[in-house]
Image (cartoon, helix red, strand yellow):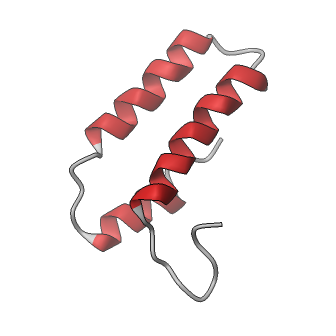
Amino acid sequence: MCINSTTTIVTRSCVRRLYKDLLRFGRNELQYTDKNYFYNRIRKEFNSNKNLDRKEDIEYYYKVIPIF
């Protein structure tokens, strides 16, 4: 696990793992949503946030945004 209650460090590998887990979820678990829409939405969100620099912004998007 990349984040626990004592540390809030989000590394590049944590974000990459989240991206892969979301794509895997779409491939294996998704039943009622269009898979192409789901994949495109994930790619769009990750591409739009790939230039985040501030630690607080990265932690926010890592913790709050991917609620699936």
The picture places residue 22, in percent across and down from the top left corner, at 60, 37
- Residue visible at 63% across and 83% down in the picture: 5
Nearer to me, 15 or 35: 15
- Residue visible at 53% across and 84% down in the picture: 7
Location of residue 45 by image quarter: top left
Location of residue 1 by image quarter: bottom right
- Residue 34 as seen in the image, left or right of residue 16: right
Q: Total label count? A: 0
- Relative to 30, does residue 46 appear above or below in the rendering? below
The picture places residue 42, in percent across and down from the top left corner, at 47, 31
- Residue visible at 36% across and 62% down in the picture: 58
- Residue visible at 65% across and 41% down in the picture: 68
- Relative to 43, does residue 12 appear above or below in the rendering? below
Nearer to me, 41 or 16: 16
- Residue lying furthest bottom: 6
The picture places residue 14, in percent across and down from the top left corner, at 51, 58
- Residue 32 as seen in the image, left or right of residue 37: right
